[in-house]
Amino acid sequence: MHVLVLGGTTEARELAGALHPVPGLRVTSSLAGRVAAPRLPVGEVRIGGFGGADGMARWIRDNAVDAVIDATHPFAETISFNAAGAAATAHVPLLALRRPGWVAGPGDDWREAGSLAQAARAVAGAGRVFLTTGRTGLAAFASVDDAFFLVRSVDAPEPPFPPHMEVLLDRGPFTLEGERDVLARHRIDVLVTKDSGAAATAPKLAAAREAGLPVIVVRRPPVPAGVPAVPTAAAAAAWVQSLAPGAVSG
Ligand SMILES: NC(=O)c1ccc[n+]([C@@H]2O[C@H](COP(=O)([O-])OP(=O)(O)OC[C@H]3O[C@@H](n4cnc5c(N)ncnc54)[C@H](OP(=O)(O)O)[C@@H]3O)[C@@H](O)[C@H]2O)c1
């Protein structure tokens, strides 16, 4: 049985690690190739786009894929919709692996934004903004010229980006101590984040709470209609087992 894991997340690497040693199972992880030096999962890896939903359907057929798990980032919307189309065209089962979103607790001052564009409107004139939504969404903030942005990203961003900006090249996991230091050192007034739900990037939320800072939380896009979803790599591995109980013994 050949399983295609659409990856680029911690959970996708966990899933590849769980499935890799299973006898009778071939696992291929797919990465977009967006990051210069990606963290690689164990086992077979392919890198680069498929060429839309049709290209992915072709890849599924050409490589005799039996099942697809979309373990991409909750905000990687296009690839998730492509996966839904490709799985339907190629007649293979598809599962979405989506970690749960963050939940506000006592002392949090969170304001929800429906999109990056709405988050950009919310921070106009808001002072010094810590922007942790990734370099690919920076264009949404490019016209905000009355705020300063501290932009944290793995690789250096390319234009368009906001006129008043400093870039902090870094990649999680982050610590509470480190996040406190960033907020204080850069005299941050407001934090902007996607609701990624990742443990590795959650300490910024605790640091903002401690500092009494507001947080603009960008809401997730929905999982494509009709695609079942599970919250953990273990649950996704169990789903694979349910498809091929004979092949998957461990
Ligand atoms: N969006 C985020 O905030 C974020 C954060 C952390 C990690 N990531 C990871 O980074 C990757 C790119 O994110 P994105 O938001 O740019 O995606 P996206 O907008 O949903 O996808 C854009 C295009 O990139 C290609 N692609 C995306 N993920 C791929 C994968 N796993 N394997 C092969 N091709 C892929 C596809 O190209 P074709 O149409 O040519 O197939 C897709 O149409 C994702 O895999 C995601 O898991 C994203």
Image (spheres, grey):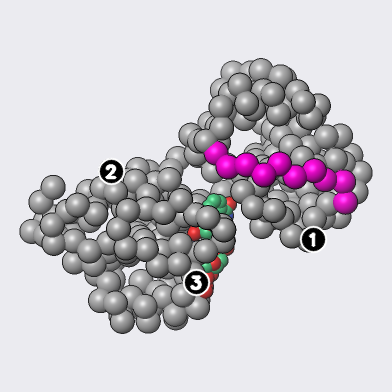
**Place of residue 62 in the rendered image (x, y in percent of width and height, measured from the top left):** 31, 81
| Labelled pair 3, 2 in contact (Cβ < 8 Å) | no
The dot on residue 160 is 1
Q: Nearer the viewer, residue 115 or 132?
A: 132
Is disc 1 surrounded by few (<14), some (14 to 19) or many (20+) residues within 10 Å? some
Q: Nearer the viewer, mark 2 or mark 1?
A: 1
Q: Is residue 166 magenta?
A: yes
* Mark sitting earlier along the chain (2/1): 1
Residue 194, x across and y down, in percent: 61, 44
Q: How far apart are labels 3 and 1 at the CA level? A: 23 Å
Residue toward you, 198 or 30: 30
In-front residue for pair 56/16: 16
Q: Amino acid at mark 3?
A: Gly
User: What residue does disc 2 label?
Assistant: 234
Q: Which residue is mark 3?
A: 49
Decide: is 179 above or below 71: above
Q: Residue 59: in sight, yes or no? A: yes
Is the CB–ligand 1 distance for label 3 below 8 Å?
yes
Q: Which residues are magenta?
A: 163-172
User: Any atom of ligand 1 within 8 Å of the CB at mark 1?
Assistant: no
Left or right: 203 as drawn, with respect to 185: left
